[in-house]
Every structure is written in C-alpha cells, then in structure tokens.
C-alpha cells in the first residue's frame, strides 16, 4: 500500500511539474554574457522567441545573420537550450519574464561557464541612446591586434553605418579568416560591436581620437587584447593562396582515416580515381569552417554529378572517435554536408601539419586544397572569408567556381 501511494505521489509530482511549467514568452529579448563582474564587462546580443504551434524557437540575431535554435527544454522554471551546430548550451531559469543562468562551452574543460541573463522586451543591443547621426566609423581600417608585441597581427576592419545612423555592422578580415557578423553602435566618439553565434563570443570596444581607433577585443571571459586602427582603403593582407604551399611541387599528398561509419577512406580509393578533389582541413568547433562547410555543401550538390569530390579532414577538440563523431554528425545534418567527413582523431594545427607533411605548415582552420584529376595540388587557400565580408566572399566564390570548372574540363 505504501509503495502504491509513493508511486501515485511521484506521478502527481511529475505531472504537476509538467502542467505548471512556465511558457517562454514570445517576443524580443536582450541577452547578455557577463564576461567580467568586477568591471561590469558585458557582451550583449539580441534574440527573438517565436512559436510554431506549441513549439518555441529562439532566433539569435547578429547583423544579417539569423541562427535558429530549436532544441529547447522547458521543465518547471528551467529553460535549457542547445546551439544548433556547436557543442555549447544555455542552462537557465525563469525570473519573471526574463532568464538567468549559464552559457556552457563543452569544448573547454576549464573556465567553460559564463553567466548569462536575458531581459524580455528590450530591443537595443547596447543600452545607449542613439545620438545625432555621424558616420565617422564608415569604411575600411588597417588594424593591428596586440600592437608592439611579439603576438602582433594585422587585420582589415570594415564598418558600415546602417542608413547613416549611429547603428553599425561590420567584421574584421584576417589572414586566417574573418570575425563573422558584428553588430553594435556608435556612442559619442566610442565604438561598440558584438557577436554571439554559439562559438564566437566577441566584444569590441574602441575610441576614436584624431582619426585613429584604439580599443579592446574580448573573446569570451578568458581572452582580451588591445587593438588599434587607422583608415586605409589600400591596405591588403597576405595572399591567402600563398601562405601554405607544397615543400616539393611534384609531391602528392595522401592519407587514410575512418569516416563517420568507421570505414577507412584513402585518397587512392576508386571513388576518387581520375576526379578533381577538394580537401577541407576543418573542425566542427570552428565558425569559419562552418561558413565554408555551408558553401562547400552547395558546391558539392552543384558539381558532384560532373565528377567533383570533396573530403573533409576533421581535427576536433577531442581525440575520442565517438565524441568527434557525435559533434560532426550534428554539423553534417545541419549544413546538409553530403561529402565525406573523415575523423583524424588529431587536434590542432601542429597535428594537421604532421598529417599533411608535404605542406610547409597549416596555419589556420579551415585550409583548403584543390587537386586536379591526377591529384596534383593546384591551389591551397588559407582561412575563409565568409558571407559577413560581403565583396570578399563574392570574389572568393567566383574564383573558386572558376577553378572548379577548369579542373572538371581537364
């Protein structure tokens, strides 16, 4: 009798918890990642909650980018949701119509939690009141990160005032990729930009004096560095097609790794015989790789019947096959990647350089190799300028597809 009573009581509690779960309110929210509580450094981003029937979705907004989050669990006062591509998630609770909790990055083993809050019905990304439109940040800027140090690096910042207002969008182009979709605003002589996409958690602040910018770049809660910039429409970075190259021009590359079904795949397999092949050196944790993967998925769909093959060599954050497989399957499904993905069970650029030892070095994820029908390396492209870079992305696509058509004709 006691056991039956306990069972009924447990059923009642579970049913009551389900019945009285709160509903995530439809509308706009201002999300904030608290990078540093001591000096009140906050990384803001915007998202909307929408419903299709009874099922909610969260749409994260960065400039023109929209990220749809549909893995949402609501139980009682708890609201948990996973990012669609990257292995990160939010664990939160309701506080009135708002949310409070943590963003958890599973790629990291330490310092992988950042406090998070979201306020309902707040639409401004940054909490400043727009002033008189003065598009002083418009244009192209020669940028230096960590100036006057051994870690100094160059970039190109491109900023655009939205319809000549204080609101801004932009990105930074580097020799290893771009900083994706940044959004923010001007406040007086100061610049504020941010991006959150599930992997990148970027905040840029800067001040303009006598035409020069100086500020701080924050990446999550564990990294920050100074940056400076000056307007220079003629500044160029190193040619992305010349950074990585064959040590011996006549040498061919080869490898053997398991695919997601543990079948060992080699470039010498019959499937690739007498076909041009694109080799993508990537990782599911890498936002630039995801931009490139989305593009290559379209390319493969368009040219596979003409004989093009693509192989992704995945260098994950874990050397465990099953962990890597799970993360790569999420990416494959989300981005409709129908080409082969091989699990190297290696991590980092140094290991990638060892795997592809015919090359001088791998300096960035992604790095992309273009092979002709004889599997000779025709071109190696370092990094990826994604859709946030506008014209640079369009130029890359034109050059890439021109090369693919040439390789298919030979």
Image (cartoon, rainbow, N blue to C red):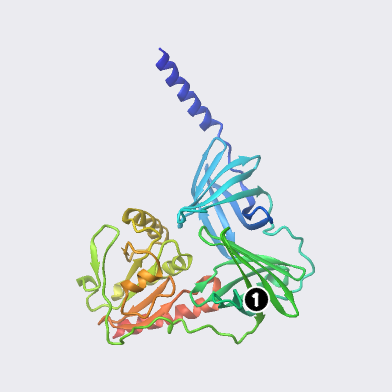
Residue at 44%, 19% (x, y): give it: 6
Give whichever of 138, 209 is nearer the camera: 209
Callout 1: SS: strand
Is residue 252 in view?
Answer: yes
Would you identify the image quadrant in which residue 206 lies? bottom right
Residue under the image location 76 percent in, 73 percent down = 134
Q: Residue at x 70, y 79 (%)?
A: 212
Picture coordinates of residue 55, whole percent (x, y): 51, 44
Residue placed most toward the observer, 350 or 131: 350
Residue 292, compared with residue 57, is above or below; it is below
Task: Quarter of the image for the N terminus: give it.
Answer: top left
Position of 184 compared to 219: left or right?
right
List x then y, in percent, for residue 287: 48, 65
Identify the residue under disc 1.
228
Q: Nearer the viewer, residue 83 or 54?
A: 83
**Residue most extreme to the right:** 132
Image spot of residue 360 (x, y percent): 37, 81
Horizontal side, residue 188 vs residue 401: left or right: right
Q: In this picture, is 66 found above or below 56?
A: below
Of residues 171 and 34, the one drawn nearer to the viewer in this rendering: 34
The spot of residue 232 in percent (x, y) is 64, 84
Quadrant of image for the C terminus: bottom left
Is residue 303 among what the camera can see? no
The mark total stands at 1
Q: Residues within 10 Å of mark 1 (few under 14, many from 20)?
A: many
């Amino acid at each position: 009798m006691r056991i039956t009573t306990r069972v009924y009581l447990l059923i009642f509690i579970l049913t009551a918890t389900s019945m009285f779960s709160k509903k995530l309110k439809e509308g706009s929210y201002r999300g904030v990642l608290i990078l540093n509580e001591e000096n009140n450094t906050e990384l803001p981003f915007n998202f909307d909650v929408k419903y299709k029937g009874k099922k909610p979705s969260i749409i994260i907004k960065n400039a023109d980018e929209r990220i749809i989050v549909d893995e949402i669990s609501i139980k009682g006062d708890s609201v948990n949701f996973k990012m669609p591509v990257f292995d990160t998630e939010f664990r939160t609770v309701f506080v009135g119509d708002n949310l409070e909790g943590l963003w958890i990055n599973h790629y990291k083993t330490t310092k992988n939690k950042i406090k998070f809050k979201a306020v309902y019905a707040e639409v401004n990304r940054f909490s400043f009141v727009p002033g008189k439109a003065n598009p002083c940040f418009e244009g192209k800027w020669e940028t230096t990160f960590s100036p006057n140090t051994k870690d100094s690096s160059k970039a190109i910042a491109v900023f655009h005032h939205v319809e000549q207002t204080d609101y801004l969008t932009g990105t930074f182009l580097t020799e290893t990729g771009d900083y994706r979709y940044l959004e923010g605003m001007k406040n007086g002589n100061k610049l504020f930009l941010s991006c959150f996409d599930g992997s990148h958690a970027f905040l840029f602040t800067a001040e303009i004096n006598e035409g020069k910018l100086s500020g701080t770049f924050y990446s999550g809660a564990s990294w920050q560095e100074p940056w400076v910039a000056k307007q220079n429409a003629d500044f160029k970075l190193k040619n992305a097609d010349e950074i990585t190259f064959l040590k011996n021009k006549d040498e061919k590359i080869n490898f053997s790794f398991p695919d997601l079904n543990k079948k060992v795949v080699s470039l010498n397999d019959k499937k690739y015989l007498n076909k041009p092949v694109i080799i993508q050196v990537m990782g599911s944790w890498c936002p630039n790789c995801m931009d490139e993967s989305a593009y290559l998925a379209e390319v493969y769909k368009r040219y596979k019947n003409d004989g093009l093959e693509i192989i992704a060599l995945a260098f994950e954050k874990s050397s465990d096959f099953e962990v890597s497989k799970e993360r790569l399957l999420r990416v494959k499904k989300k981005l409709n990647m129908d080409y082969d993905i091989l699990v190297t069970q290696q991590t980092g650029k140094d290991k990638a350089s060892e795997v592809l030892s015919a090359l001088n070095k791998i300096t960035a994820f992604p790095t992309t190799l273009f092979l002709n029908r004889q599997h000779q390396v025709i071109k190696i492209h370092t990094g990826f300028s994604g859709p946030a870079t506008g014209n640079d992305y369009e130029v890359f696509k034109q050059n890439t597809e021109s090369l693919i058509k040439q390789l298919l004709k030979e």
